[in-house]
Image (tube, rainbow, N blue to C red):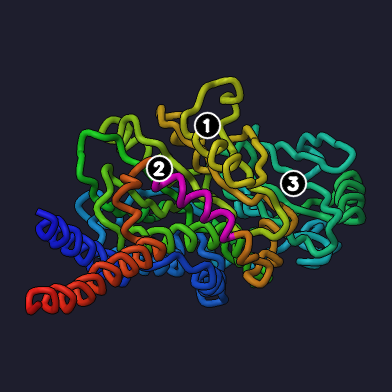
Amino acid sequence: MKKSLYLVFTMLSLLGLVTSLFLKSSYYEFNSSNVKNNIEYLSSNDFKGRLAGSEENEKVATEIASTFKEYKLAPLGEDFKENFTVMVPTPNGNECSLRLLNGSSVVKKFILGTDFKEDLLNFNESSISFSKEDKIDIYPTSFSIFKDNIEYVFKVSFDKTFSFRSSFNENSSFGFLIQINTSTFSEILNSIREGNTLDVKLPYAVEPKKISNVTAVIKGSDSNLSPLILTSHFDHIGTDSLDNIYYGALDNASGVSFMLEVCRSFSTLKIPKRDIIFVALNGEELGLQGSREFASKYEDSLEGAQVINLDMIGANNTPITFMSGLNCENKPSDLLKSLEEICSDNDISYVESYKNSSDHASFIYCGFDSLTISHSDLSNIHSPKDTSEKISISSIDIAYSLVEDKIINHAYSSIILILYKSQTIILFSILSFILIGYYFYRVPLDDIQLKK
């Protein structure tokens, strides 16, 4: 009986050791340096700011789809890329110009980048002239000219480089928004009062373009359980009329690079108990278009899912922000509660925010329990200064410790995951050594006793 128990324990110990060694060797550990390298790649000159509808944006979508395929994930739908059509600002060949005219004579041609610059907010009209016959509303730091019941905004920028660029909004009520300096503000108003006209030409027109979300899934063992969804947008705001690239390293090459590394790591684990869905969203900078498309498409089939959106991961010396919807402050959220508990257990600093300024808003609107995890450093956002060298590896690691615990707690059996731990391999190794050593120690003694 004792011999049988000994053999059973020895075989189980060896089996546990071999299993743990196999699982450990096949498991890819999350690497924050790889995240930063991918951020540097996606925010490089090659992708020119990844404006939705551009060739560079489509190239990123194709590379993400190839990455999901490389990790042996399945597409959520028929294909990794899920196409939809949006209105986007597209170069129209115009020179970006702002001129004061007296008839056909040029009174003043303002200098692009010094006196004024276009803003991406809207380009419903790319070429227009104003005169003193048009209504003008004047404010301390802006003025609006109304023509054919459309408001055109000229706003003073106190940043002499005009570095900030806003997201595009096809539903904006403004015809366009132009940034100007204080002297341009005065010159335009005085010149129009004198009877001159203001001629504006902008380098974009609004056109429909096909863009893609990119989706993939790690299939779980129980299809009756609602999935866990991780999302992150990969588009940004392109280049301006001076060919400045808005690199979008923190916003949001960081979020999508982080998500892809999470995906790579968990794709090498055992099958989870529920589906884990990864969605690279497009068109966030066009007014959350990609998340609206995805959330409305899967509102019924993914009912009950928790959605973690990753937007701006890796800012240095910045606490994690949990951003929920504008009207969610007093509404219970299982997702938020679970993340708060993880932060409390691991001494992770966080703050809460309630805004609709990222893709979580689209999911909340469609009834999902959703929030955005972010390092909300806004100091360089939507400017050419949002570059990869400002990304902190230690901040990435903190974010991963939070996301990893959430995924494991929500989607895996923690007992099975013990087999992946180095401590488990050490334990099985020691136990196997003791049991086998005991065998070789006991056999000679037994033989000696039998001979006597």
Kind of residue at badge 2:
Asn
- Residue 397, located in which quarter of the rendered image? bottom right
Q: Residue at x 14, y 79 (%)?
A: 448
Image check: 171 left or right of 212? right
- Which one is nearer the viewer's eye here, 342 or 247? 342
Whether 172 is drawn above or below 25: the answer is above
Q: Quadrant of the C terminus?
A: bottom left
How would you rate the neighbour count of disc 1 (Cα within 10 Å): few for under 14, some for 14-19, many for 20 or more?
Answer: few
Determine which residue is flagged by label 2: 409
In the picture of the structure, the residue carrying the numbered disc 1 is 337
- Residue at image mark 3: 130
Q: Secondary structure at mark 2?
A: helix
Residue 274, position as x, y percentages in the image: 27, 42
Q: Residues within 10 Å of mark 2 (few under 14, many from 20)?
A: few
Mark nearest the camera among 3 and 1 is 1
Percent x, y for residue 179?
Answer: 76, 53
Give, as a three-letter code, the residue at label 3. Answer: Phe
Residue 103 visible, this orientation: yes
Residue at left 63%, top 53%?
120
Distance between the alpha carbons at the discs numbered 3 and 1: 54 Å
Can you give x and y, in whole percent of width and height, for residue 317 in the image? 73, 57
Q: Amino acid at mark 1?
A: Lys
410 above or below 255? above
Residue contact at pointers 2 and 3, CB within 8 angstroms: no
Q: Which residues are magenta?
A: 396-408
* Secondary structure mostly seen in the magenta stretch: helix
* 372 part of magenta stretch: no
Residue 399 belongs to magenta span: yes
Could you give the CA–CA distance between mark 2 and mark 1, rounded to whole angstroms? 13 Å
Helix, strand or loop at label 1? It is: helix
